[in-house]
Image (cartoon, coloured by chain):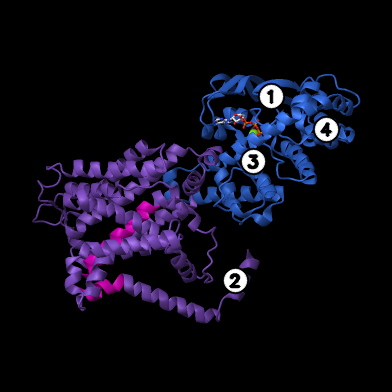
Chain colours: A blue, B purple
Amino acid sequence: MSVLEVSDLSIRFGGLQALLDVTFKVDEYEIVGLIGPNGAGKTTAFNCITGFYRPDRGHVFYRGQDVTGMPPHRKSAMGFGRTFQNVGMVKSSTVIENLKTAQHASADYGVVSGLVGTGGVRETERRLEQRSDALLELLGLTDVRDSYVGGLPYGTLKLLELGCALATQPDILLLDEPSSGMGPEESHDLGDRLIELRREFDLTMLLIEHHVPLVTRVCDYVYVLNFGQLLAEGAPSVIQTHPEVVAAYLGGEAADALEQTSAPAEEAALAAEEHEAAGYVRERAPAQKKSPVKKVAKKTTKTAKATAKKATAKKAVAAETAAEES
Amino acid sequence: MTAEASLAHHARPGTPVASWVGRVIVWLGLGYLVLLLPGAIGGEASLDASQAAIYVLIGLSLHILIGYTGQISLGHQAFVGTGSLVAANVVSTGTSHAAEPVHFGLSLVAAAAAAAAAAVVLGAVALRITGLYLALVTLVFGSVAANAIFSISSLNGHEAGVTALRPASLVTDYRFYLFCLLLIVLVMYVDIQLGKSKTGRALAALQENELVAQAFAVNVMKFKLIAFALSGAFAGLAGALYTYRVQSFSDKNFSGTPGFNLALIFVVMVVVGGLGSRAGVVVASAFFGLIDVLLDLAAKHTFMAQYYSDHKQYVSGLIGALLLLQTVILNPGGLGQVVDPVARWLRGGRFSLHGHGPTSGSRAADVRA
Ligand SMILES: Nc1ncnc2c1ncn2[C@@H]1O[C@H](COP(=O)(O)OP(=O)(O)OP(=O)(O)O)[C@@H](O)[C@H]1O
Ligand SMILES: [Mg+2]
């Protein structure tokens, strides 16, 4: 049984069909990538899955249970951990306070005993604090323990937010662009970290990510969204070379993508190793022996250039909406 | 942590002994001022001091909504009034005999419960609205509820007021004042526990960002209602004391213009005290509870006496307005910016005007908008 199954998910905002009949699944212990150009509907899919949006149509199943209409706080308590695209933490609180807040569901005392301050409450609070400290240590962030979140650099925040999501004791972790604001090296480390965290906490993950090397490295399987619809799916190496994907997704960034994937051989090998180590079972499309990325990319350069204009325009819109959101 | 502590230790001005002597002197001074002075002055002093104590309770109550939850209540006089009315009717002593201690206790509990219930009703109505609309809804709710319920003549002693004599043990004003202080200690204890528990963290999270709170498994609706309930309960308790202070309930205090004025003062004293600063709110509330007395005192022996007594209500209103303006424009952290460092020092910390929080003004700024 899949940990997460999404079927025929559709949602419309005014005149915009943000998602249309999107169907995918995430199996136990998998790291699944959800990629696509700006405005494709990735974050919207996250919001539908975690209960922040109510889809017009379609269903969300968690381990076989229909959880479509469940409110987000209950989903969080049930095992959906998530991060936000533009950092979701309580900025006016300290790091340690945030980690404790994130453990709300495991603070198992009643509100009234909390107000009385019984011994049980103190015991639980100590436990929450210990777990928070352990998480900080794991992420190497112990020195910002008592800092206010508001003043920290973006890269640190993204990592901290991951820590907060872990603090909710998730069964499945949904990460919205965890590597944004990180340099190539940091994002490489993030890849190691995600794989390590999966092992440590027995996690299943769904990952929205623009950074191609990270996707190829950690993902067992990838779904591609475009204009609210599923465009392609498959193993990262396959997706990477899928002509339509290259045209649609990498369109404006073809040159970039080429550069980023110029050393894919060892990355792919590493990923494959990891997948095996993880006991990865999903049937993969027949793997290609050598990465033909360059060839395909070259072939599609023309198309890419044509779509480049469109993509830049779209990006501008996305940036605007992001600005509005924040 | 230990390194930090020792650093703080070294940076402390003066020798440790000298600064502890200073602390003890200030503690003793405060203790005398709060505990003994009202009794020593005699006359009306204890009654005046209990008014300050009641305002402190109300300030702490409203601070839970405005400071912790980011909700505003412009109808808080209705909750205080509900407590006042319920306490008077539950104990219903008549004019001849003192309240039985049991009835007195019961009336306090009933007052808190009734006001909490009223606040939960308002909270439920206001759950999905914030900002200006919430302010409007609470304003209307407060005055309509107060005017409607408090004018039921069987509850307000047929316009004449309901007499509620204190129990024998609290018959002197000074003892009653000490009892008010006891309740402040109780409410402050709960308030502090609130801040340390998951409820306080949940409120801080939902005040800043409801989406993040939900991602952290916080049931936003539930915890907003809990904040309303707790705030209402404390307001109801303050209302009961309001009744016992003058030993009667009168609907005139809480409905119509006087009621509206009260609601405004309550909000002003919390903002002037400083959102997020318990100590600041306590000091500011006490000040607003005493403002008329202080002005009387100041005017008494000057040529202003006649002028002041002619324009009494405008003068205190004007002072409130000026304090509000200076807080909002110049000093968004409120009185807390001064009081908090002193309070920290009194607890043995280092004196520094630069608080260790992210400017508590950042939250006050929201009120400005
Ligand atoms: N609450 C909303 N109301 C109206 N439109 C929305 C809302 N949420 C998302 N949209 C729109 O839905 C479309 C998909 O947005 P979404 O944020 O899911 O894209 P995305 O794939 O996450 O893009 P990006 O890579 O830029 O984050 C966009 O056009 C966006 O403007
Ligand atoms: Mg997005």
Residue receiving disc 4: A271
Residue receiving disc 1: A226
Closer to the camera, B301 or B166? B301
Q: CA distance from mark 4 to mark 3?
A: 23 Å
The chain carrying label 2 is B
Residue receiving disc 3: A166
Helix, strand or loop at mark 1: strand
Instruction: Measuring from the top left, give residue A99's x and y in whole percent.
Output: 59, 47
Find the magenta span and give its range. Answer: B35-63
Q: CA distance from mark 1 to mark 3?
A: 29 Å
- Do callouts 4 and 2 point to residues on the same chain? no
Q: Is residue B83 above or below residue A28?
A: below
Q: Residue at x 20, y 41 (%)?
A: B149
Q: In the image as oriented, which residue stretches furthest toward the right?
A: A290
* Dot 3 and dot 2 residues touching (CB under 8 Å): no
Q: Residue at x 89, y 35 (%)?
A: A266
Query: Does residue A116 appear in the picture of this structure?
Result: no
Residue receiving disc 2: B8
**Residue B242 among magenta residues:** no
> Sequence order check: which comes first, mark 1 or mark 4?
1
Q: Residue at x 26, y 71 (%)?
A: B38
Which-is-in-front pick, marks 1 and 4? 1
Helix, strand or loop at mark 4: helix
Q: Quadrant of the N terminus of chain B?
A: bottom right
* Disc 3 within 8 angstroms of ligand 2 (CB): no
Q: CA distance from mark 1 to mark 4?
A: 25 Å
